């Protein structure tokens, strides 16, 4: 069996370091926030080229607080995309604001900057592009539009730790950048975690208060806040893992390169990397008309694949009240029908990549013979 993801392999490769970090935290009893978390905030912000990092308990909380810092509130609108994990849109909803979707570019499947300006209304407060699958969205035109209309840009970088846009790491490029450290992400905790990074001191201060009950001083609640603090153990583990992130990214990119090499010439569309981008391949998704058939075929061969995502958010039952008819965002919708994510993790061996590619070749051969 070839799993879609293998978290055990990663743990085995750094077990001693992780175990020690956990034991040290237990001994220190800094269970919530504490020195490991604040050091991790500094290290990860620096990694992103940002001045400030505020650790929270999930990527969803990071998005929620970033939106609140950008003063998104009831009646406001936030421009985003529909082919994303539901959390992007849920966070907008938590603020009482409405998501306004624009369709994506056909090649990167990221926010199409050409569609942003016509989606702006008097109520628009922010633009929330997603760096889907670890490929950066085209930020410069989005930032330019935001500047002209006095809007904040919040990057959903939950899948894009270390990805580069024009030689700068994502997250620190917009006004606010949000990361998830969910276990399966490129930088994953042993539990939940997230972070907001920013260059803006006022945003940082506000988010720091909001994640901890709106207080700067204990029991003096200046803002209506939340319990969104990061655990001490997760901070300690993430510090260890951050030191391995670049190595893992290199390994992910190597797996992607091998897939690209061995899957050319087949009747499927491979993911691309823009000339200005360094993608970190959180997901390696191919597009194929016979998606469900390939999914089943690989499953029969013992290869687990994923579908990211089978239903775009605007067509999810939970968001039916947004009332978008089908075909509102044709590219987002067609990607939900034709995308198939192949196994990709840093420890995935060359020979397993070759096995997967051989199965896909066989699938095409059998289809040709029919
Ligand atoms: C994972 C993810 C989130 C949410 O992160 P959690 O840590 O699971 O709350 C948000 N947006 C995107 C694009 C994600 O992939």
Image (cartoon, grey):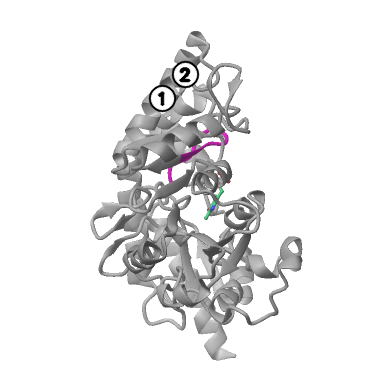
Residue that carries the numbered disc 1 in the rendered image: 38
Whole-percent x, y for residue 67 in the image: 53, 49
Label 1 lies in ligand 1 vicinity (Cβ under 8 Å): no
Q: Is residue 70 visible?
A: yes
The reply to whether the C-beta atoms of the residues labelled 1 and 2 are less than 8 Å apart is yes
Write the start and end of the magenta stretch as one range: 186-195
Q: Which is more toward the observer, 139 or 204?
A: 204
Which quarter of the figure is the C terminus placed in? Answer: bottom right
Name the foreground residue: 234 vs 117: 117
Quadrant in the picture for residue 222: top right
Under circle 2, the secondary element is loop
Tell me: 71 left or right of 346.
right
- Crowding at mark 1 (Cα within 10 Å: few <14, some 14-19, many 20+): some
**Residue 247: image x %, image y %?**
30, 43
355 and 79: which one is in front? 79
- Residue 76 falls in image quadrant: bottom right
Residue at position x 55%, y 33% in the image:
210
Could you tell whether 40 is left or right of 5 in the image? left
Please name the residue that numbered disc 2 is placed on.
34
Secondary structure, magenta segment, majority class: loop
41 sits to left or right of 166: right
Say which of 86 and 244 sits in front. 86
Q: Position of residue 87 (x, y in %)?
A: 60, 52
Circle on res. 55: none
């Amino acid at each position: 069996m070839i799993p879609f993801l293998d978290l055990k392999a990663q743990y085995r490769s750094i077990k001693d370091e992780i175990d020690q970090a956990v034991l040290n935290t237990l001994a220190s009893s800094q269970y919530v926030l504490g020195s490991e978390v604040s050091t991790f905030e500094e290290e990860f912000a620096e990694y992103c080229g940002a001045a400030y990092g505020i650790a929270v308990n999930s990527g969803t909380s990071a998005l929620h607080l970033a939106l609140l810092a950008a003063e998104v509130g009831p009646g406001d609108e936030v421009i985003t995309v529909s082919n994303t994990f539901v959390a992007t849109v849920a966070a907008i909803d938590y603020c009482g604001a409405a998501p306004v979707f624009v369709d994506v570019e056909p090649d990167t499947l990221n926010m199409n900057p050409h569609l942003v300006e016509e989606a702006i209304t008097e109520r628009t407060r922010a633009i929330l592009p997603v760096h889907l699958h670890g490929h950066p969205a085209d930020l410069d035109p989005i930032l330019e539009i935001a500047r002209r209309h006095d809007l904040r840009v919040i990057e959903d970088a939950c899948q894009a730790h270390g990805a580069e846009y024009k030689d700068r790491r994502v997250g620190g490029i917009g006004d606010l950048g949000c990361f998830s450290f969910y276990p399966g992400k490129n930088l994953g905790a042993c539990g939940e975690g997230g972070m907001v990074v920013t260059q803006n001191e006022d945003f940082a201060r506000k988010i720091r208060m909001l994640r901890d009950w709106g207080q700067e001083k204990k029991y003096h609640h200046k803002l209506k806040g939340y319990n969104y603090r990061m655990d001490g153990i997760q901070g300690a583990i993430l510090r260890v893992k951050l030191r391995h992130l670049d190595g893992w990214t290199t390994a992910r990119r190597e797996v992607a390169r091998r897939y690209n090499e061995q899957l050319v010439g087949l009747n499927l569309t491979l993911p691309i990397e823009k000339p200005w981008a360094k993608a970190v391949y959180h997901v390696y998704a191919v597009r194929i008309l016979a998606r469900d058939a390939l999914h089943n075929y690989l499953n029969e061969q013992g290869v687990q694949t994923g579908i990211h995502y089978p239903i775009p958010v605007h067509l999810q039952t939970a968001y039916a009240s947004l009332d978008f008819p089908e075909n509102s965002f044709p590219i987002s919708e067609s990607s939900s029908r034709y995308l198939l994510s192949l196994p990709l993790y840093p420890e995935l061996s060359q020979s397993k990549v070759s096995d997967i590619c051989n199965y896909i070749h066989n699938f095409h051969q059998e289809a040709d013979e029919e």
